[in-house]
Image (cartoon, rainbow, N blue to C red):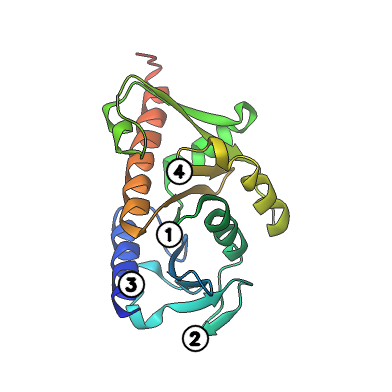
Amino acid sequence: MVQAAEELSATIKLLHRRGWCDGTGGNFSVVASREPLRLLMAPSGVDKGSVQPEDLIEVNSSGDVIRGVGKASAETLLHLRIIHCCRAGAVLHTHSLSGTLLSRTELDKGSVTLEGWEMLKGIKGVTTHNTRVNVPIIANSQDLQTLSEAAAGRMSEAPHGLLVSGHGLYAWGDDLREARRHTEILEFLLELTWRQSLLGSHS
């Protein structure tokens, strides 16, 4: 548990330094145990750049805080749904400029297409740049049950990540290291896509 807390704290600080969870933005979890299900999470409403291992809270399968001080994120239910549907070991939610913007401007299309880039090979299961993946976009909702159900309906097609409109990226992996890699890869490709659209290039 101590090592997991240290690794999650370090990951949150890294993502903050990248500008992907400014201020109190973002929420992050790692599975501490499966039976019973326990998540380590950053508490809601804290500066993500200064979260220490001892600041993390432990949450059960109902989203209730069972250890630590602070409230669980309102989006804990979505973390739990991703973990259940994908057997994920960690879920990382970022608020980058490119991910947040594309998730709104491309909502009518239902996804953001990433195609032909070498960095795609950083996504689990992708072995060549000569491929296309579609990152699903779901409409945002303050009803977390509705949001979680919408996400669950798109997870089977998701490349270990999906976008919530106007809200940013959720990425996951079998463990924290893989979830961080998927976050970095998808954020890179989303920024690439955004900048490419600014250039008016389709090469």
Residue of label 3 = 4
At numbered mark 4, what does the secondary structure look like: helix, strand or loop?
loop
Residue 69, numbered label: 2
Q: Are marks 1 and 4 in contact (CB under 8 Å)?
A: no
Viewed as shown, does residue 26 lie left or right of 71?
left
Residue 187, by quadrant, is top left
Q: Which image quarter is the C terminus in?
A: top left
Residue 66, above or below 106: below
Residue of label 4 = 160
Residue 61, above or below 190: below
Residue of label 1 = 90
Q: Amino acid at mark 3?
A: Ala
Viewed as shown, does residue 88 lie left or right of 79?
left
Residue 62, numbered label: none
> x, y percentage for residue 134?
49, 29
> x, y percentage for residue 42?
45, 71
**Which circle's residue, 4 or 3, is located before the other in the chain?**
3
Q: Residue at x 62, y 41 (%)?
A: 138
**Which circle's residue, 2 or 4, is located before the other in the chain?**
2
Q: Nearer the viewer, mark 2 or mark 3?
A: 3
**Nearer the observer, 168 or 3:** 3
At numbered mark 3, what does the secondary structure look like: helix, strand or loop?
helix
Q: CA distance from mark 2 to mark 4?
A: 30 Å
